[in-house]
Amino acid sequence: MKGLITLFVVVLGLAVLVACGGEKATTGTAGGTAETAAGTAPAGETVDNELLAMTLADGWKAGPVTYGMVNVLPADGRTSPGLYFKFEGHGNAAGTAEASIQSMIDNYNGSPMLETMIAGIPFKTTTYTFSKSVQTMHVAFREGTKITITIEGEGAKDNPDIQAMLNSLKIK
């Protein structure tokens, strides 16, 4: 229950940030190139911390690890589209990916649950709208840690930059 409340608070916080952002979400790339549109590895900086390693697309930046979370956003200051990582439990996480995603489906009229492979890990996935913001949530449990990856913004789950960054992702 505590994890669900924490997840709800994070999603609510993201929705508030998006609502206050002042700019409409775009479906284009933040700094897209022909390379990222083709789905190859992005050409930006590399993020390498205790949770993950990933090559950022040009025009994107990653924040520091804060309370097990890493936010990857356009470098121009927009909050949408966005790629949000959350790591919970640190070896002691309770629950299942299925239950987490089913809760989002039930509470936010999410799409049917799918399985998506990200970084070689099977994630349970749904897409839903929360506070006028389209979000695709991926949840997996690995070695007792709950990993949540949320892609926020209209059309963001198909954004070539985001897809290229996810293709370069390595979960530690």
Image: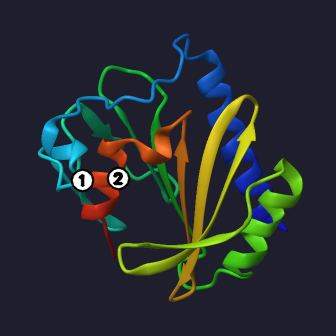
Residue 156 drawn at (x, y percent): 48, 40
Q: Amino acid at mark 2?
A: Gln
Crowd around label 2: few <14 · some 14–19 · many ≥20 (10 Å): many
Total number of numbered labels? 2
Identified by mark 1, the residue type is Gly
The kind of secondary structure element at disc 1 is loop
**Relative height, residue 42 to residue 149 (above, below):** above
Label 2's element? helix
| Quadrant of the drawing holding the N terminus | bottom right
Query: Which quarter of the rendering shows the C terminus?
Result: bottom left
Q: Quadrant of residue 101?
A: bottom right
Residue beneath disc 2: 163
Mark yes or no: residue 91 visible: yes
Check residue 92 in the rendering and tell me which mark sits there, or answer none: none
Which numbered circle lies on residue 39?
Answer: 1
Q: Determine the CA span between mark 2 and mark 1.
A: 7 Å
Residue at x 29%, y 27% (from the top left corner): 75
Looking at the image, which residue is at 17% across and 55% down?
A: 41
Residue 66 % position (x, y): 46, 50
